[in-house]
Image: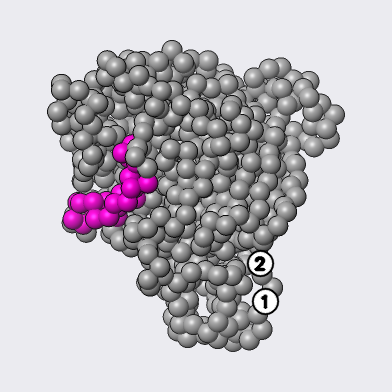
Amino acid sequence: MATDATRSLRPRRRMLRNLLHAGLADALSLVGGSLPLVAGSLTLVPSSPAQAAWTMHAGNAQHTAVTTVPTQPLQSIHWQAPVDLQPQYSGTVLFIHYGSPLITEGNTVIFPVKVGVADTFRVEARAALDGSTKWTLDTDYLLPPHSWVPSVGLAMTPRGRLYVPAAGGTLLWTDALDEPGAHASTRVAFFGDADYAANKSAMDASLRVCTPLTSASDGTVYFGVRAVAANPLGITSGIAAVDASGSGRFVSMFDASGGLCDRVGLNCAPALSRDEQTLYIAGRGASSAPGYLVALATSDLGTRHVRALVDPLTASESFVSDNSTATPMVAPDDKVYFGVLENPFGTNAVRGWMLQFDADLVPAGVPGAFGWDHTPSLVPVSAVPSYAGPSTYLIMCKYNFYAGWGDGTNKIAILDPQTSQLDSFSGATVMKEVRTILGATPDPEAGPSFPNAVKEWCINTAVVDPFKHSVLAGAEDGKLYRWDLHTNTFSETITLTPGLGEAYTPTVAGPDGQVYAINNATLFAVGATNVGVTPVTHTSRVPRVFAEPNPSAGEATLRFVLGSEANATLDVLDLAGRRVATVWSGSRTAGEHRVRWDGRDTNGLECAPGLYVVRLDAGGRVTTARLLRLR
């Protein structure tokens, strides 16, 4: 957010100036392809591990935030739950980034809850249908030093294992995520469980997980760590990984950047390339500038590329602020998008810039006019029916124009990364605006100098629904909006709270299309009224889909399980939500069924290496899984 707690001289100036002083499912697999079937068994198989529908920050390891099912209409608040039992307000403003909720394919909603004033967290798992508590899990996680409270970011792996940040740079994991009752956890340390046990107090005082967690399709979890004090093992700030067997690897940010910076950007969730061979993450030093984007090999965390983040207007070093949640987003053409804050501060109306790079971190196009504290969402061109430009995808960005630097006409935007226009404020050449829409609620607190000011958008990630040509996003007026990209209107709005100034928050979609948003320290589950809604009542009735082998270098076998006889359609999608192939369509009995996919699309062409999504629609119940195709 960009607002001042006292709201006196026009809010945003003091607070944003202080930024500088403060230091500025996952599915087991996928398959799709040819139509030959192997006869299905009539015997129901045992319940499988929970498969994640929304696995981590912005939904997946590329952070595209595209839902693979149609979202429900925003008609009713189904339930709500606190994500902070002791929220600490600065006047009327809440300077805390809350971690993203996750949702399993069994429709269990899992989210972190701040219990104490400054620290102390637990994880809660609730039934998506009614919000009833299934289980809770305490963690001894301690936050790194901060100004705005950073997010606590969980991640789920393809086989349904949940990882949670814990003390001393360690993680806790648990599984059987859809099952109610007490859940035990297992601790894993990237530097060795025995070393942690032998030096527990010292490591707890030294290391802090400092980013949301990111999971790869093989179950490896990546994250940033900051060393806030010396420790007996000599571990400094850097990037860590833990695989499914508990083995770890680590590289210091100093070594990863070739000595250019020494710490990971706070809240910057690692992003993985589509083939999961490269990890992207931001780094900085004790000051917010200079900032860098680093590309590492996932196999050994060896450095592939380092790119200085440069302000495109002034050619100065861009800021990577610790108060930001900006995270790289990897697009279907392997471009990497990352938002920074401008330098000198205020020269772009505190909007920052959305920079774009190719897979090797070579600058690859003009910037977007807004990048501060934001992860862009991927927008398939099919979601904007009127679009006729050259791009195969677009991006959705927050587009606030903060009163005091701008005129308070806060918008959200769909941008074309391959075409350009002149920005009316800075004069810079920026990504072309395909669609923009002004916030709906006037902001009288902006004062008489800004008569057109509206409440700002409160987004660090927003859900893109390509099925309904729309974006789902929240604002500081306490409302959740559906932005219809066909009509360029707010086709649906629901009020969650009276509204307040707060740090930016995520929006999430579940496997039944229910939408989740956080406002004023509360998680809201939003969707249709009960009329016409088919509730998920038990995980054994939920269709499930698996693939072997995963990753796959050639043909894969898709295994799907139906809880009852149903008309089933199995589609393969790319990460932009476009249909690659229809594998099966027809009626099937309850039980397990198998289909082979030769890795080719509907035109018979071999699909490129990368991550794909399989979507199984069984009588209106939709589940998704992922498959990593290798060369």
Residue at the spot 57% in from the left edge and 78% down from the top edge: 563
Residue 352 relative to residue 596: left or right: left
Magenta segment, which residues?
470-496
Q: Which residue is mark 1?
A: 45
Determine whether, in the image, residue 472 is placed left or right of residue 592.
Answer: left
Q: Amino acid at mark 1?
A: Val
Q: Nearer the viewer, residue 567 or 96?
A: 96
Residue highlighted by disc 2: 48
Q: Amino acid at mark 2?
A: Ser
* Distance CA(mark 2)–CA(mark 1): 8 Å
Name the residue located 52 percent from the left edge and 69 percent from the top edge. 536
> Residue drawn at (31%, 39%), measured in percent from left and top?
477
Closer to us: 392 or 122: 122
Residue in front for this viewpoint, 603 or 530: 530
What secondary structure predominates along the stretch shown in magenta? strand
Residue 477's tag is none
Image quadrant assignment for residue 607? bottom left
